Amino acid sequence: MSTSSTPERTGTRWLSADEQCTWRGFLTAWQWLLASVDGQLQRDAGIPLAYYEILVRLSEAPDRALRMTQLAAASASSKSRVSHAVARLEERGWVRRVDCPTDRRGQIAQLTDEGFAALSAAAPGHVEQVRQVLFDRLSPEQLRQLARINDALLAAASPAPGDGDCLAALDEPGAG
């Protein structure tokens, strides 16, 4: 949206032409990346990216299990969206829900051996797709810049839905 009104008159801090171009480019690139990765997973593994992310989060958790609320936060999804996804994954036998032993209201999602096998089968194609659409297109310096940008954006989230300091991980020996 373009406007000739000044911020003093409207109270709105409109985007400059450069900011608008950057914003729209970011949205287009992000949507393309997500569609590309999601499409590959749907085509090759029969699951959407959101389900793959749930399987990954569970596979990385102790005992391959997380409380549903923790799973929702870790996957940056609403509780109802995660509950629906877990129900679909349960139908496939990839996840099971169990009652939380310390809280009668809580439930735990646990990755089954079948779910871990499905994740293991889907992972190579997924990683290759991520490499093709993101990492192969960036130089090492661009990767560090992207990590700094991600960290800055996630620092503003409350609580941050991400995995912490990506830039520190890039600086570790043997990384990137």
Image: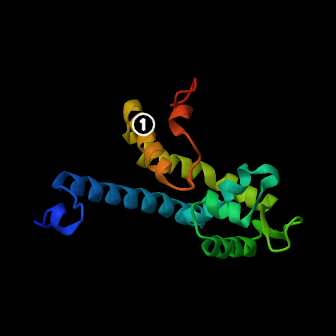
The residue under the point 53% across, 65% down is: 43
User: Percent from the top left, x then y, of residue 149?
Assistant: 41, 43
Look at 44% across and 49% down and name the residue there: 153
Amino acid on which disc 1 is placed: Leu
Residue 12 position (above or below residue 158): below
Quadrant of the rendering where the N terminus is positioned: bottom left
Residue at x 82% of width, y 52% of height? 63
**Which residue reaches farthest right?**
101
Q: Please say if 132 is above or below 94.
A: above
Apparent side of residue 142 relative to residue 163 in the rendered image (left or right): left
Going 72% across and 66% down the picture, which residue do you hit? 68
The spot of residue 71 in percent (x, y) is 68, 61
Q: Quadrant of residue 103?
A: bottom right
Q: Residues within 10 Å of mark 1 (few under 14, many from 20)?
A: some
The spot of residue 16 in percent (x, y) is 18, 55
According to the picture, the residue beneath numbered tag 1 turns out to be 143
Q: Nearer the viewer, residue 92 or 43?
A: 92
